[in-house]
Amino acid sequence: MRRPSPLPQPPAATRGAGAADAPATRAVVVDDVEDVDARAPRGRKVDDAPIQVDANTTAPVIPLALTAESAAPGPAPDAGDTDDPEVGFREVWKAARARRKALRAEVRRFTVRQRRRRAIWLGAAASLILLALGTIGAAYSPLFGVEKISIVGAQQLNAADVAHALSGQLGTPLPLVDESAVKKALVAFPLVETYALEARPPHELVVRIVERTPVGLIETRAGYTLVDAAGVALSTTATPAAGTPVLTITGGVDSDAFAAAGQVMRSLPDDIRAQVTAVTASTPDDVTLTLGDTDTEVVWGNAERSADKALRLQTIMAARPPQDVYTYDVSSPDAVVVR
């Protein structure tokens, strides 16, 4: 058997100088790393151990710390251990369920502000709806029943009589007042031209009345009938009422002459209307008025520009009273003739 050659030793001077500085280390000079890998024990590479370099040489030095245990080959891995275990349906279902829960949690986390805003809007809308329903329910309940009926605008009519005729609405909730029943009760009062109902919560019903304006008396077989400008009979008496003019109209209340006379009477100021004792008209263009005890005539003509004619007549009558005048001709308001 051939004896291996001894390892090369560093020079004596160098070895003596470094002996005090560093511990003696048995090193093997390796010229080729591939040779070291080839001589490394099975199961462990040289890379696993640190490589030292001697101070006197540039060649790597491998420490002789590899023992028999580290050099012993490890157990070979079992080929069957690399295979994944079989996954069952239960595990897949649990994983999918966990994934869905995680997704839902993320969605809830990122939409919390939107859900809070939606909840606020829904709460406000629900509150408004409940308030409206409560208000409507209270309005249609006996809490808002009619307890008082007030009549406004009655001058010739007796307000107490009108309120008594509407007493059937007492106790009825204000929104449920029967307008047809109110109309039926007010028809019995011919002087009522128009009316309007006004509810004043919680318990008052106000009836605003516009009375008809009488224009004169029409002589009939039954006596003297008081009529308004529309020809509606308001009352009938056996003798003419004082202060009400007598109308002598060709064709009756359904004629155009009566319509013109009614329009003229309604356009007169109150002070002049109170002086009129008679109105005559055979056509719509020859309306004539008679004033007071002087029998002064006012030739009016047709009903056109009645407001201008009334204003001119009032001015002229102030300057020349009827006692000194026989006729006022205002048929042409731009050229009034006084005789």
Image: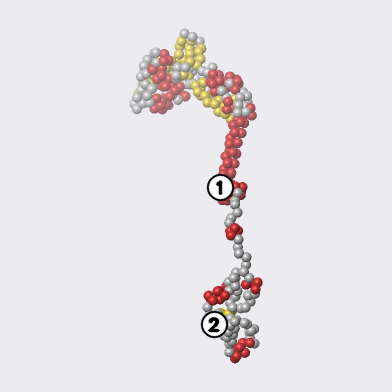
Mark 2, residue position: 58
Name the amino acid, label 2. Thr
Q: Position of residue 327 (x, y in %)?
A: 38, 20
Occupied quadrant, residue 277? top left
Q: Nearer the viewer, mark 2 or mark 1?
A: 2
Q: Where is residue 138 in the image (x, y as percent from the top left)?
A: 62, 31
Question: In the image, is 256 to the left or to the right of 6?
Answer: left
Question: In the rendered view, would you say 92 is above or below 140?
Answer: below
Which disc number belongs to residue 114?
1
- Looking at the image, the residue that sits furthest to the front is 1
Residue at 57% over, 43% down = 121
Occupied quadrant, residue 180? top right
Q: Where is residue 263 in the image (x, y as percent from the top left)?
A: 42, 22
Question: In the rendered view, would you say 117 is above or below 170?
Answer: below
Residue at 57% over, 24% down = 177
Q: Nearer the viewer, residue 191 or 309?
A: 191
Report if residue 151 is visible in the image: no
Q: Are marks 2 and 1 in contact (CB under 8 Å)?
A: no
Q: Which of 324 and 74 is in front in this view?
A: 74
Q: Which numbered disc flags the more N-terminal residue, 2 or 1?
A: 2
